[in-house]
């Protein structure tokens, strides 16, 4: 006799940004890092993680790079689906992606939303997040406790205030929430930089799960060397 259906875990990778701050001349997610494009690192990791049932990637409708990326990675076949539904910002790209897969997932399946710009993610970190949230009613995210002393600046770039860092965390991705809850939260929310913020607007408290420095977001030109160091290690 079979028991109740176990919720599945899906990856959702918003990859429809431009990444202007990196100044690479191509969209950031296609920039080569340690021998392959940033997005390929992320998709290799998701495709190789057995607990992930399938991964969806959201790119812009006129993306001219993804075709070559997929053609060069036959091992993604059956593991990765490309959705040409990118939006004006990250929030819109994730929401469009969720709406596009509505018939393929159940409300209680888990969605792991992960930035294409965090190529340092590992299968171990994905498994750590899933294990930590297995019985959680809300869901949560990888994050790192803040270790530096924090300063708030004034308009002249001088210290206006020292901010108490106790209990402060820096949010990373994946951010992992059930499909139905996440769709509801992102549909109602405005002006967000992450999924957890939308869940918080519903009055819920996402769980913080300790991540890793190697999972940092590649944003500025000087991040490239650090990312390559982690990816080669
Ligand atoms: O620009 P930033 O690094 O903050 O973007 C975070 C993630 O959101 C990246 O993976 C980027 O490709 C994605 N994004 C998106 N659609 C947008 C803007 C950003 O999918 N319109």
Image (cartoon, rainbow, N blue to C red):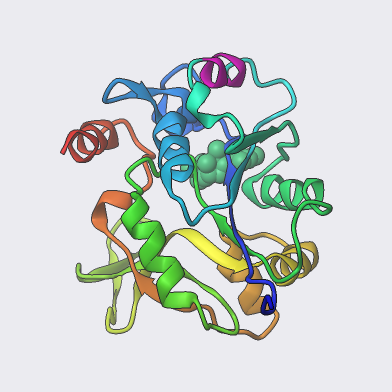
The answer to whether residue 154 is visible is: no
Q: Quadrant of ligand 1?
A: top right
Q: Is residue 22 above or below residue 131?
A: above
- Direction right: furthest residue: 103
Say which quarter of the image contains residue 146.
Answer: bottom left
User: Bounds of the magenta span?
Assistant: 66-71
Q: Position of residue 162 (x, y in %)?
A: 26, 76
Q: Is residue 182 above or below residue 81?
A: below
Q: Is residue 74 above or below residue 216?
A: above
Determine the main secondary structure of the stretch shown in magenta. helix
Which quadrant, please, contains the C terminus? top left
Residue plotted at (52% across, 62% down)? 175
Is 95 one of the magenta-colored residues?
no
Residue plotted at (26% across, 37% down)? 227
Residue plotted at (65% across, 32% down)? 59
Residue plotted at (56% across, 60% down)? 194
Q: Position of residue 2 (x, y in %)?
A: 68, 75
Which quadrant, please, contains the N terminus? bottom right
Q: Position of residue 181 (x, y in %)?
A: 72, 72
Say which quarter of the image contains residue 138.
Answer: bottom right
Q: Nearer the viewer, residue 75 or 44?
A: 75
């Amino acid at each position: 006799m079979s028991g109740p259906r176990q919720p599945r875990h899906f990856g959702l990778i918003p990859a429809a940004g431009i990444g202007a701050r990196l100044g690479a001349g191509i969209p950031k997610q296609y920039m080569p890092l340690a021998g392959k494009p940033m997005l390929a690192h992320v998709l290799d990791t998701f495709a190789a993680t057995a607990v992930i049932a399938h991964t969806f990637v959201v790119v812009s409708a006129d993306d001219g790079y993804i075709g070559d990326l997929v053609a060069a990675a036959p091992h993604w076949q059956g593991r990765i689906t490309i959705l040409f539904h990118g939006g004006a910002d990250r929030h819109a790209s994730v929401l469009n992606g969720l709406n596009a897969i509505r018939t393929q997932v159940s409300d209680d399946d888990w969605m792991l939303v992960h930035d294409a710009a965090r190529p340092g993610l590992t299968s171990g970190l994905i498994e750590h997040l899933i294990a930590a949230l297995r019985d959680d009613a809300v869901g949560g995210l990888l994050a790192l406790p803040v270790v530096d002393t924090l300063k708030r600046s004034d308009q002249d770039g001088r210290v206006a205030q020292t901010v108490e860092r106790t209990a402060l965390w820096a949010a990373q991705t994946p951010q992992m929430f059930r499909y139905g809850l996440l769709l509801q939260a992102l549909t109602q929310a405005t002006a967000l930089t992450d999924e957890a913020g939308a869940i918080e607007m519903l009055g819920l408290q996402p769980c913080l799960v300790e991540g890793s420095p190697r999972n940092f977001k590649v944003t500025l030109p000087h991040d490239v060397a650090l990312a390559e160091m982690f990816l080669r290690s």
